[in-house]
Amino acid sequence: MRSTALLAPLVFVLAVVVGTAGCAAAGSGGSTGIRPVLSPIDQGEVPDDTTVYDTDVPAVARLDGDLRAALTAASDRAAGEDITLRINSGWRSPEMQERLLRDAVSTYGSLDEASRWVATPETSAHVSGDAVDVGPFDGAYWLDLHGAEFGLCRTYVNEPWHFELRPDAPMVGCPDQYLDPTEDPRMAG
């Protein structure tokens, strides 16, 4: 019996070939609506044990450069204290963000409740590459205590893993956190 793992590359190749042939047939740059199938990793999924040093992972590579530099400096310092900062989520494609939002609506029962945890693709700091979720608990806790020194600040009280770059934080400290994303004016879209 053939393994589905062996068939996955074949399906991807067929999708790309069909998509390419369809685009060529449409002429003048037109699209037939067929898109290549992106792997979960290419959409922003993060393999276990990913760190900021794993720049071959799109969720890390597509982070804002200044955010990635601050995370690297923080990770270097944390490592000196036997703490590892893992990247649980970083950059995400709009499609992945939309899927996460749909899943949250299903879990929490309404868009209003889901919005306390997941932003829309249009407002998510993950989609723009401006946010990172850090783990495990001791890594997120360490970053919460020391992140301001690197310009890395927790944004939401209900998400102790979510950090964004605030370049002036080393001088003035992190701004007050929002209780959850529904209090963040950037989420008004």
Image (cartoon, grey):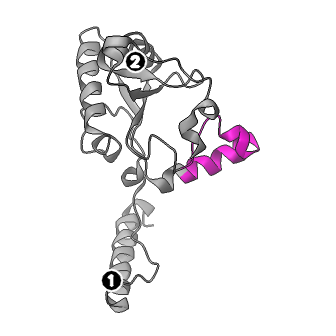
- Front residue of 173/77: it is 173
Q: Residue 139 carries which label?
A: 2
Specify whether residue 103 is painted magenta: yes
Query: Callout 1, which amino acid?
Result: Gly
Note whether 126 is above or below 36 in the view shown.
above
Residue 29 location, quadrant: bottom left
Q: Which residue is drawn at 28% across and 19% down?
A: 74
Residue 181 location, quadrant: top right
Farthest residue to the right: give it.
109
**Label 2: few (<14), some (14–19) or many (≥20) C-alpha neighbours in 10 Å:** many
Classify the position of the N terminus by image quarter.
Answer: bottom left
For label 1, the SS is loop
Instruction: Looking at the image, tell me whether mark 1 or mark 2 is earlier in sequence order.
Output: 1
Query: Callout 2, which amino acid?
Result: Gly
Task: Tell me residue 45's x, y (percent).
Answer: 42, 46
Task: Tell me residue 124's x, y (percent).
Answer: 50, 43
Q: Is residue 52 visible?
A: no
Q: Which residue is drawn at 40% across and 67% down?
A: 7
Cα separation between marks 1 and 2: 47 Å
Q: Most prominent secondary structure in the magenta stretch?
A: helix
Q: Give the range drawn in magenta.
A: 98-120
**Label 1: few (<14), some (14–19) or many (≥20) C-alpha neighbours in 10 Å:** few
Say which residue label 1 marks. 29
